[in-house]
Image (tube, helix red, strand yellow):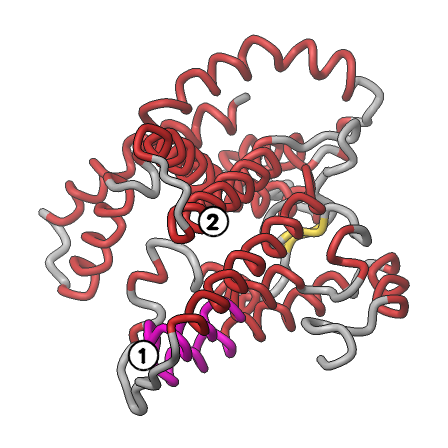
Amino acid sequence: MFFILISCLMLKNAGVWLCHSLTRIHWKPYQDIAHIFIGNLNGGNYHNFFIYFMDPYVAGCALFIMPYFYFFDRKKPLHEDKYVSSMKTLLSLPGVLIKKRLYWNTSSKLGFLTIIIKIFFIPMMVSWSISSFIQMASFFPDFQWSFQTVNMYLIQLFILIDTTVFSLGYLTESAYLKNEIKSVEPTFLGWIVCLWCYPPFNTFSFRPFDFYIVRIGLSYPSWVHSVMTIVITGLWGIFVWASVALGFKASNLTNRGIVTHGPYRFCRHPAYMAKVSIWIIQGIFFGQFGILILLGFMLIYGLRAWTEERHLSLDPAYITYKKKVRWWFIPGII
């Protein structure tokens, strides 16, 4: 409960603190980055979390945390709890000033890394989920049974399902749900290529790729565009199928147990395959992306898959899974 309250306090005041820092730090690169962060905190990536979710969430945690501990967590030894270990580390900090030893172990590290992941992703995913719900609701008054409208509606529905599943994954962690975080991505590269893909970092992270060396400007018959639109909607379906298969284990940078059902029966990274395929189709058939940025997407998501493979391969269960499912992205090909 302490970490929940501190995290919410930090998130709620981060924009104010950053604005205040701009009056004291005049280094231009810092000013530019701070403005990006402030824009994200005040914009759609976090706005709905602060308005609709944060206060009821904190109140709900305060109300149900003791019953939860009693019914689901009372048998767990305290020394095995990563959050307890992290709290012990914080409490031992004053002792460092009088040359006492800092309390630190692998559980403390796991606890702090887990808290960082949750602080970063929970507000974003919850805000996206609420935004998707609002957009879905706005579709109904003017809904028309046309090809484009139905496809837009389905894609928005898939995004709503995906963001809701990931929101629940980040918000819940319990032995009862079998989704406790067992390990966190151990490498700096793994964190970089993951965060690279999310706001506020993707505001500037893809800029090195975002210019045209070769512009894809081919023309196609209208029926080809219709077929490709259906294919894109189907790929979004595969993407959300992967999220639903993860269920309460859905989260980035973590191992919460190996999932082997759903699309994970056929390849080990179906969501990345679907997402990159969507961008390739949008670039080639709809001219929305140039060659260089498509290569950038493939590079970054290839690195994400590679770093995840390294991390998850520390788990013997994943080694067994890799022997059964050989393909990373496309069954029988790669």
Circle 2 residues within 10 Å: few <14, some 14–19, many ≥20: some
| Residue 237 falls left or right of residue 11 | right
- Asked whether residue 88 is drawn in magenta, I would say no
Sequence-first disc among 1 and 2: 2
Residue at image mark 1:
208
Please state the extent of the stretch shown in magenta in the rendering: 277-299
Residue 115 rendering spot, x and y as whole percentages: 54, 40
Q: Main secondary structure of the magenta part?
A: helix
Q: Most extreme residue toward the bottom, as rendered?
A: 214
Q: Is the C terminus in the top left, top right, bottom left or bottom right quadrant?
A: bottom right
**What is the three-letter code of the residue carrying label 2?**
Ile
| Residue 275 falls left or right of residue 108 | left
In this orientation, does residue 149 appear? yes
Residue 52 rendering spot, x and y as whole percentages: 36, 22
**What is the three-letter code of the residue carrying label 1?**
Pro
* Residue drawn at x 86%, y 62% as measured from the top left: 321
Residue at image mark 2:
155
- Asked whether residue 285 is drawn in magenta, I would say yes
Frontmost residue, 64 versus 158 = 158
